Image (tube, helix red, strand yellow):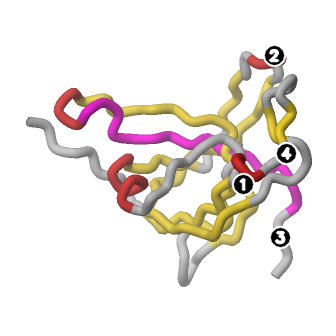
Amino acid sequence: MADYPNLIHPVPITLRLADKGSALWDEDAGEPVGKVPRSVDKTVDGQVSWKMQDFTMKEGGKVVTADGYILFRRKDLDAAGITIEEEDLIVNIGEGQGDVDVNFYVLRIQLRGHYPEFGGHTLIKAWYARKAPVRHK
């Protein structure tokens, strides 16, 4: 049996999850209308990559530029009761000394590290981008 994959240099990542069930929804566009309500902040370890990556979204043919991605272990997200989705907000990277307050939106989710003995994917890659000015404290 393979070992569950580990993250390299994990740091605490604080997420503010979108509550799409409470949002007004545009059925034709398949997206929320206006500001999406958000849940309380939740923190889980992730591996940050600040690399730039371009990709094309199939819906509408938009070209979206991501500022990087954060890699999470599925079992850590499950233990924290987090289901990460597009439009979730990343508000802090590296909680504590040396932390960075950010305002990143999750653009795309990729499932990685598929092992049959762990029931499928073990890693979740969340591509993010800066889509609005950083919050002021």
What label does residue 104 carry, if any?
1
Give the amino acid at mark 2. Answer: Gly
What's the distance in space between the residues labelled 2 and 1, CA to CA?
22 Å
* First of labels 3, 1 by sequence position: 1
> Does residue 126 appear to the left or right of 128 in the view shown?
left
Quadrant for the N terminus, please: top left
Residue position marked by numbered label 4 in the rendering? 24
Residue position marked by numbered label 2 in the rendering? 61
Dot 1 falls on a residue whose secondary structure is strand
Depth check: 109 or 119 in front?
119
What's the distance in space between the residues labelled 4 and 3, CA to CA?
24 Å
Q: Quadrant of residue 69?
A: top right
Magenta residues, as a range?
A: 119-133
Mark 2 crowd level (few <14, some 14–19, many ≥20, 10 Å Cα) = few
Give the amino acid at mark 4. Answer: Leu
Q: Main secondary structure of the magenta part?
A: strand
Camera-near label (1 vs 4) is: 4
Give the amino acid at mark 1. Answer: Phe
* First of labels 2, 3 by sequence position: 2
What label does residue 62 carry, if any?
none
